[in-house]
């Protein structure tokens, strides 16, 4: 376990997650580590962005999320940006860069918020 969380490495990994493709279904829900609907609010200008139908708006949403990642002051703030279905996966790829306190807090948070998903995954094995 590290003495201090390597937040820069965790931010780097989160930016890689940001590049995941958008997965969508017939209902207006998408699967992505940072977005769960095709409609995103541009917090800088207050504009409504449709990230599925407009490539420029998608790129703007990515740019805005990168700013949020960069502004994160700790791992917990970074993890809060990740959508629920991807938190455990993100934790899996970043836990080796965490100190004991961040590791413990985040594992507890993920377990509590995603317990049903974790149990379902474990029961399938």
Image (cartoon, helix red, strand yellow):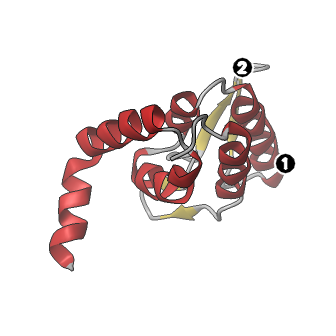
Q: Nearer the viewer, residue 95 or 36?
A: 95
Q: Position of residue 76 (x, y in %)?
A: 51, 30
Give the residue at x 59% y 48%.
97
Give the residue at x 64% y 56%.
17
Query: Please, is residue 53 above or below residue 73 in the view?
Result: below
Q: Position of residue 77 (x, y in %)?
A: 56, 28
Q: Residue furthest bottom?
A: 125
Asked if residue 64 lies left or right of residue 21, the reply is: right
> Badge 2: how crowded within 10 Å, few (<14), some, or many (20+)?
few
Residue 46 is marked as 2
Residue 86 is marked as none
Read off the residue under disc 1: 56
The quadrant holding residue 107 is top left
Q: Nearer the viewer, residue 102 or 113?
A: 102
Give the residue at x 75% y 44%.
62
Query: Please, is residue 8 above or below residue 18 in the view?
Result: above
Q: Position of residue 28 (x, y in %)?
A: 47, 51
């Amino acid at each position: 376990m590290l003495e201090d969380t390597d937040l820069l490495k965790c931010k780097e990994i989160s930016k890689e997650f940001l590049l995941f493709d958008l997965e969508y279904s017939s209902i207006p829900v998408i699967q992505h580590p940072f977005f769960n609907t095709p409609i995103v609010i541009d917090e800088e200008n207050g504009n409504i962005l449709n990230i599925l139908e407009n490539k420029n708006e998608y790129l703007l949403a990515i740019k805005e999320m990168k700013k949020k990642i960069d502004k994160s002051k700790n791992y917990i703030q970074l993890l809060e940006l990740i959508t629920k279905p991807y938190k455990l996966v993100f934790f899996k790829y970043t836990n080796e860069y965490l100190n004991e306190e961040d590791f413990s807090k985040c594992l507890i948070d993920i377990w509590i918020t995603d317990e049903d998903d974790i149990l379902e995954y474990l029961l399938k094995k």
